[in-house]
Image (spheres, rainbow, N blue to C red):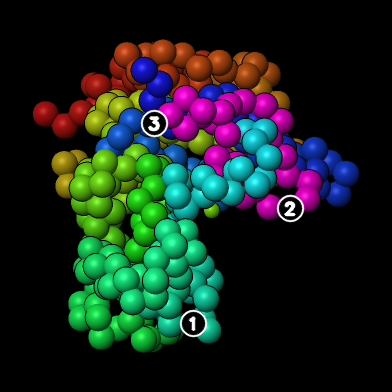
Amino acid sequence: ASRLLEVEDLHVRFRVRGREVRAVNGLSYGLGEGETVAILGESGSGKSVAAQAVMGILDGPNARVTGGSVRLRGEELLGLPERRRRRYRGDRISMIFQDALTALNPVFTVGDQISEMYQVHRGMRRKEARARAVELMERVRIPSAAARLGDHPHEFSGGMRQRVMIAMALALEPDVLIADEPTTALDVTVQAQIMRLLAGLRDELRMGMVLITHDLGVVAGVADRIVVMYAGSVAEEAPARELYARPAHPYTRGLLASVPRLDRRRGPLTPIGGAPPDPAALPPGCPFHPRCPRAEARCAVDRPPPVTVAPGHTAACHFAEEVHVAALADRPG
Ligand code: SF4
Ligand code: MG
């Protein structure tokens, strides 16, 4: 049986001032009902662009998918005419963003915006649509939902506005929800509430969720699998527990070392030095080598292929096996 969402060897390119930029270079992941895949990376790693390609909303006239496959319950979405593609958006795959204020229309009330989804896509009458809007606002735990139907987006707090956007994304009961940095703009307490809400809705609605983030702390306890992207390519991919316990890529180790964890002895946080490379001018060899504490001479020359270090766990590093073994030895007793 085909899985809910299958992304296979996705390639996306841009053309910037006459130069070809490989924004996404061979991303693959699969997702079942009720499962969450986290795509983790710094800004410019290609994670948002990859999500836009899956959603069919790549922007920029020069952005295009140059290879790969995106299948929803076995049906290929890439190459569908825009008119047919549009039918999948909202209905089958839905997306939420970091900034609810730009995703929502400032002019209309929240009640109008949510009920319009039902009127336009489900042919409901206004009264019925508004009743459904209240149900949905309750489902995303907006207090006094009925009383807030007439409020505009700016009248909600950041966290409540994020809930409104989630409500709109879920209105048509999509099979897959793509969440692009859904909590980045919020303070830590509200972040945790929103992540709990998303995880609860995912379970309740048996949705697949693609969670895009730069923050490993956000995905803990929510993601089943984690794909770590660096400079457009997959650096490492593993079941979440395995990735936390035994990272096999120096980049992932660096990311983990910069996240405070309760199960580790306290030590200084060690953020990764340097900045990600310009995607239009990637270094030869391993794209991470200018920043990598483990790099050796060959890393500047040979691009490392993905190495399988455990079932379902791969890392694109010449020394993946050693890094993996070392991570095991480092585990707190
Ligand atoms: Fe570091 Fe070399 Fe591994 Fe790249 S291949 S992550 S530079 S050790
Ligand atoms: Mg982004």
Above or below, 150 relative to 189: below
Residue at 25% across / 52% down in the picture?
Answer: 201
Above or below, 54 relative to 68: below
Image coords of residue 278 (percent x, y): 69, 44
Q: For marks 2 and 3, give the one nearer the viewer.
A: 3
In this rendering, would 222 be left or right of 98? left
Residue receiving disc 2: 60
**Is residue 38 inside the magenta stretch?**
no
Residue 72 visible (yes or no): yes
Which of marks 1 and 3 precedes in the sequence?
A: 3
Residue at 38% across / 42% down in the picture?
Answer: 175
Frontmost residue, 189 versus 146: 146
Frontmost residue, 197 versus 187: 197
Q: Amino acid at mark 1?
A: Phe
Q: Amino acid at mark 2?
A: Gly
Residue at 37% across / 59% down in the picture?
Answer: 171
Separation (CA) of disc 2 from disc 3: 28 Å
Query: Pointer 2 and pointer 1: residues touching (CB < 8 Å)?
Result: no
User: Is disc 2 surrounded by few (<14), some (14 to 19) or many (20+) residues within 10 Å?
Assistant: few
Separation (CA) of disc 3 from disc 1: 34 Å
The stretch in magenta equals 48-77
Which of marks 1 and 2 precedes in the sequence?
A: 2
Residue receiving disc 1: 108
Residue at 86% across / 49% down in the picture?
Answer: 17
Residue receiving disc 3: 4
Frontmost residue, 252 versus 70: 70
User: Is disc 1 surrounded by few (<14), some (14 to 19) or many (20+) residues within 10 Å?
Assistant: few
In this rendering, would 133 be left or right of 212? left
